[in-house]
Image (cartoon, helix red, strand yellow):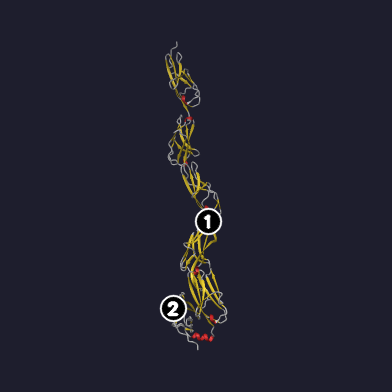
Amino acid sequence: MQFAESPGTSTFLSPSDTSYTLNEGSMLPSITCSAECRPGCLFVWTKPDNINFTASPVLSLGQLDRTKTGEYSCTSWNDYGFHTIKIMLNVQYGPGGSISLSPSRSTYTENEGYPLPRITCSADCSPECNYIWSKQNEGNITVGSSLVLEQLNRSEHGLYICTARNEVGEATKQVDIIVKYGPGIIQTSVPNLDKVENQTVPVINCSADCRPACSYTWSKGAATYSNPLSLSTALRGNAGTYICKASNSVSQSVKEWTLTVRFPPKILSLMYTQGNADITENASKSMVCTVESYPASTITWYYKANNTQLATISDVLKSTYTLSNGGCLDTGLYTCSARNSVSNTPTTMDLPVNVLCKPRMDFRSNSMQNDIRIGLSKDLVLNASYLCNPEPNFSWQFHKTTSTNLVNGTDRISIDDIFNGSSLSAVSTLTRPSMEERWLGLYIVTVTNSQGSHTHLYTVAAEESDTELSSSAKKKNTYDTLDPGQVPIPILSDDVEAQGNPSNEINSEREPEETAEGGKETNTYMNVEFRKQSKFHRIYNTIYSIKDIRIETENPYANVKKKKRRRKKKS
């Protein structure tokens, strides 16, 4: 006789494993549930959600996926009871396409210095994934699911990759971080240049590290140029500081680049500080010379007539020279000469200075005499040599008992006037050939220009024998007997000497005499100032009053007075 039997605890599995861990996509082997029971048992497999999966003792899941993870139950039962046995199925899977970022943006664009929001990487993994952030071409930068970049700098620009990984597999997610920044240090392809004028200048390229890329412009003053800067040739007009400006949407920056062009001096102007070339004697005249050159020039001033160096000033572009207390012989051209290190050949420019001076006897000439002894029938030649500016007029007079103006071409008079504008020498030569006794007497030359006048006297007498001359020389300051109205002629003896400054002076007078008409003759007198020259004495400055004739000249010497002595008539 058979007894009824429930499944009790006799339910078992084949294979007998109660736990399975398999990767997603793999196959779970068929699991058969059996039990000893009478009458025979029925079997049912239940899913993890307690839903009957199959009414069969065999569990067959096919290719596993993550949804099949869970606890499966096999229940056997008959009319007398039931029994359940369970298995655990763990389906492992990698992150696959489940990896994601939060925030979900794949691109961030921020300016340098700004913070980047925290970016978190996550994925559905079994078992749980590990996370690593890396930067393209640089390797791992952080372990963990979050990317934290606080204040961005340009080095953090790039592609960042989150990798989620477990023992089943891995997956990645990328985020592009664009760090924008303006130009930092601007570079030029060629450093500052120092060139001699007309040398070649290479092309100058301006560049900078910028994101986004910079645009470039060159400027010099108000002029603008494109990049690269192409000047081709070093010209003085190209010299100076050029500015390269690099700019983008973030910021801009500038860099200076300098082209130095060295060139020899050019005199731009040479002029008087005021007025024209003319100055009066003892006045001053200032001249200013302006030069263009690089480097600055050494300016030298010269008096051109004898190439006398007057002044030298170094490292300047402008120089002023002042002629102080201008004298007659300071008239002439004044030269501004400029040179610098570029050329050894100076550049020059001349400017005239015209010192106006009244006539005075030319110390450079010894041709003027006071006492002239001449034989009758010989030619009389009187030279009047003067230093003056501007050109003077000469007038000649002859005085014996009366005064006569001497005119060229009359009474055998020849007068030749010459003025040399370079040396300021004015010479008047009076020639009277075949002298006659009636032409012996006082010859007076007066020289006049816009600045004043000067008068000189020549005493022309007949030659004496050696004996007479010796006898005359022994008498001190004697005079020939003169007819009424005739100018007294001093015969100066050798022992009268100039005393320096003040100088010697001879005063000679005679009392007025009765005239033929019964009236009184006008006092005739002579003040003679002279200086000794060897054995002879020059009558330098004289004031004559001859009836209604009066000639005044200037005397730089003081006076030594001699009393008048009448010359005795020869017996």
As rendered, which of 6 and 456 lies closer to the eye?
A: 456
Whether residue 419 is situated above or below residue 373 in the rendered picture: above
Q: Which quadrant, please, contains the N terminus?
A: top left
Q: Position of residue 436 (x, y in %)?
A: 55, 81
Report the Cα–Cα distance between label 2 and label 1.
66 Å
Reading the image, the residue beneath label 2 is 559
As rendered, which of 25 and 180 lies closer to the eye?
A: 180
Q: Position of residue 283 (x, y in %)?
A: 46, 67
Q: Position of residue 161 (x, y in %)?
A: 48, 36
Whether residue 109 is situated above or below residue 402 in the rendered picture: above
Report the amino acid beneath label 1: Arg
Can residue 102 be seen here? The reply is no
Q: SS at mark 2?
A: loop
Q: Position of residue 123 (x, y in %)?
A: 46, 31
Q: SS at mark 1?
A: strand
As rendered, which of 440 and 425 lies closer to the eye?
A: 440
Reading the image, the residue beneath label 1 is 262
